[in-house]
Amino acid sequence: MKASAMGEDLQKLGLDAKALPSLNRLPPEKLRQVMKTFNKALGTQCTGCHEANDFHAPTKNKKIASKMWDLYVRGLVAEDGGPVFCDSCHEGKMEFLDRHDKKALSAWMDENFVKKLKRVDKKENGCETCHGDPFEPHILATWVK
């Protein structure tokens, strides 16, 4: 996990990477420009999240991206105060976590998501920041219901 390298791209769009609005508050043209940063940060094309024949249709990945935007991009900063954006974790890949070894995954998440991130609201950052209390291991599945 690292501070985002997309700050300059967002600044060119007239956005401050440390004070981004909700996606649903962006004007359509600005939203389309922001989506191009998603392509770069996630290493995907538009159809990685959108239906090819209906970009307005709700999809699993659109729900996940919207939730990540609000909770992580807008709610967290790097330990040095730098902005967090999609590339901070994804580094050009839609899926980046190796879930085969739960113990190793837990240690990796603690090192990278708990220790290297701070909450914008100044509350303590811990597993429950993302997984809730009680702990929900499959958070993405709950977001797409």
Image: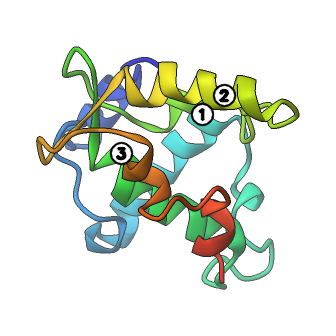
Mark 2 vs mark 1, foreground winner is: 2
Residue indicated by mark 3: 73
Residue 126 in the image, given as x and y percentages of width and height? 36, 39
Mark 3 vs mark 1, foreground winner is: 3
Going from N to C along the chain, the mark reached first, 2 or 1, is 1
Residue indicated by mark 2: 92
Residue at 70% in and 35% down: 43
Q: Disc 2 vs disc 1: Cβ atoms closer than 8 Å?
A: yes
Residue at 80% in and 31% down: 98
Going from N to C along the chain, the mark reached first, 2 or 3, is 3
**Mark 3 closeness class: few <14, some 14–19, many ≥20 residues within 10 Å:** many
Residue 105 in the image, given as x and y percentages of width and height? 70, 29
The residue lying toward the viewer, choosing from 53 and 64, is 64
Q: Quadrant of residue 62?
A: bottom right
Colour treatment of the image: rainbow
Q: Can I make out residue 140 in this image?
A: yes
